[in-house]
Image: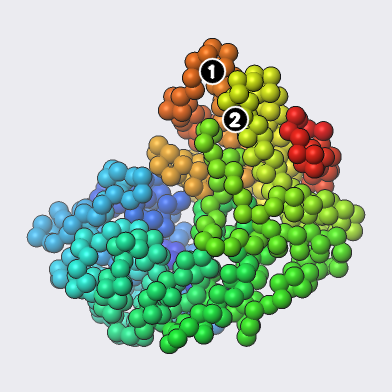
Amino acid sequence: MALSGINLAPAFAGQEAVWQRVYRNLGLNQSEIDKYFTGPAFLAWNRMGNLRRWAGPLPPAWHFKQLYLQYRIVERMRSLGMTTVLPAFAGHVPQGILRVFPRVNATRLGHWSHFDCTYSCIYLLDPEDHMFQVIGTLFLKELIKEFGTDHVYSADTFNEMTPLSSDPAYLSRVSNAVFRSMTGADPKALWLMQGWLFQHQPDFWQPAQVRALLHGVPLGRMIVLDLFAESKPVYQWTESFYGQPFIWCMLHNFGGNHGLFGTVEAINHGPFAARRFPNSTMVGTGLVPEGIEQNDMVYELMNELGWRQEPLDLPSWVTRYAERRYGAPNAAAASAWRLLLRSVYNCTGVCVNHNRSPLVRRPSLHMDTELWYNTSDVYEAWRLLLSAGAELGSSPTFLYDLVDVTRQAAQQLVSDYYLSIRQAFQSHALPELLTAGGVLVYDLLPELDSLLSSHSLFLLGRWLEYARAMATSDREAEQYELNARNQVTLWGPSGNILDYANKQLGGLVLDYYTVRWSLFVSVLVESLNSGRPFHQDQFNQAVFQVERGFIYNKKRYPAVPVGDTMEISRKLFLKYYPSTLRRSLAGPA
């Protein structure tokens, strides 16, 4: 991060340990605290007041290990000259506060996303209640005593949560209360706030409401992250956040999904346009993905733009990128990257990178297969990369990209087979349904799984082992593994945000996505055979048992890759590439 020029970053680990200390000092008991914190995989949403309890409680050992980790993080960041951003109090409190302080003025926020009040509807303190300052300042003093401070703090009161009132005076009181609880502990406090809420709920956040929230804090004492500036910039319709400084951020990735994606033109021009904006208050560029370890090129590009005076010549930049990435010039690899640049990486307009491929979504007869690019560019890039294999095959980054581009080609093929399955079913053509469904379930998806299983960075086993490695007991290991499995599948007890954080990993493709598709094809075949209509609701109930079954299957997945990546990619290519050229879906060539 430091080598890329990143000089400001969150240091959020260990905060629950400090919160627990504060809550215990205030008189809450352990069960009240346990009912508040979520499990580790969902803490981000607990910290923003969206979720409570789900996949928890946090074991005592979690707190010790996170404190130790935070000590190492802040020490390392400061040694590199980076500014740490520490968490602060946003106003959300556990229900136990109402037992200890029965006269406190706190109101329940509404439910978040598709969760009911069992796991959401968190209490928010009234900004005028004196306990707001007591709790906020107590927490921050405790945190500073533990970790020191660089005077920058983060808090988000209304992330995807509708405020209790749209009265500008109320909104100003809330932001002012948050800021005062910071300055009560650190008079030099600077508040770093996510600007996601403004573009997420634009009907609520009209100019008057935005201005009120921002002006509850003295000008210059808040920095707003224009979080999704490459697609939905907020600075343009808020007169540059009404005078508060802001950072132009690329969000890029939601849910840590795999899938080649980028908005290269928007990020190549956006930061420069923001600096030229009348009375611009832009003070930097930022990267704020929900998940990393995908689409490295986009992050390399964004990091480089922070150093530039003007937009880059992207085709020549990406040609040099390929050479840097693989350690040697190669004409075929450079051509492949120029094709990817103009296709998958060049989404224009309002682009939201949630992978909606039928591959990673619960099957139905109404799936979205639309793409923003020409699929033939990816197939051709795949061919070119394979042809560069003899020269570049010893490069780890090349092998990673070969898996990724092959995976993208396979994802495109899944959509083609899905359309054939749907067409065959709607035409009552049983032989065609059996052919397309058979190829998908018994060949293409297992082949994709074996490709992913050949590379360490595409293994479900690695994802689960990393989670288990945090544990200090078998019981903890099981809880952490369930957290890790739930996050990439059901995302909640009942598929509340189903497949939001979908991943294409060896093991997951075979035992989760393929099993779903197999059930879908079987149900369609049965429907044609029996003459009974297909009912999506009934299928959803049946497939939920499959999805839930995967989370609790206790199967151990290999954390070490198996097979020859180049060989598997070439085999897939020889089998499927000719049919992509002919646009024939009668089956693999």
Q: Amino acid at mark 2?
A: Arg
Q: Amino acid at mark 1?
A: Ser
Tag 1 near tag 2, CB within 8 Å? no
Q: Nearer the viewer, residue 448 or 341?
A: 341
**Residue closest to the far left:** 103
Query: Which residue is at 19% across, 73% downward?
Result: 169
Quadrant for the C terminus, please.
top right
**Residue closest to the far top:** 530
Tell me which numbered mark, 1 or 2, is placed earlier along the sequence.
2
**Tag 1 secondary structure:** helix
Image coords of residue 22 (percent x, y): 27, 64
Colour scheme of the picture: rainbow
Distance in Å between CA atoms under marks 1 and 2: 13 Å
Where residue 332 sits, quadrant-wise, is bottom right
Q: Nearer the viewer, residue 14 or 400?
A: 400
Q: Where 409 sits versus 518, above or below?
A: below
Residue that mark 2 sits on: 422
Image coords of residue 555 (percent x, y): 58, 33
Query: Which residue is at 82% across, 40% downward?
Result: 578
Residue that mark 1 sits on: 527
Image coords of residue 355 (percent x, y): 56, 49
Q: Is residue 347 visible?
A: yes
Q: Where 187 sits versus 568, above or below?
A: below
Q: Nearer the viewer, residue 527 or 391?
A: 527
Query: Which residue is at 17% across, 59% downward?
Result: 106
Query: Which residue is at 85% across, 67% downward?
Result: 328
Q: Is residue 67 left or right of residue 448?
A: left
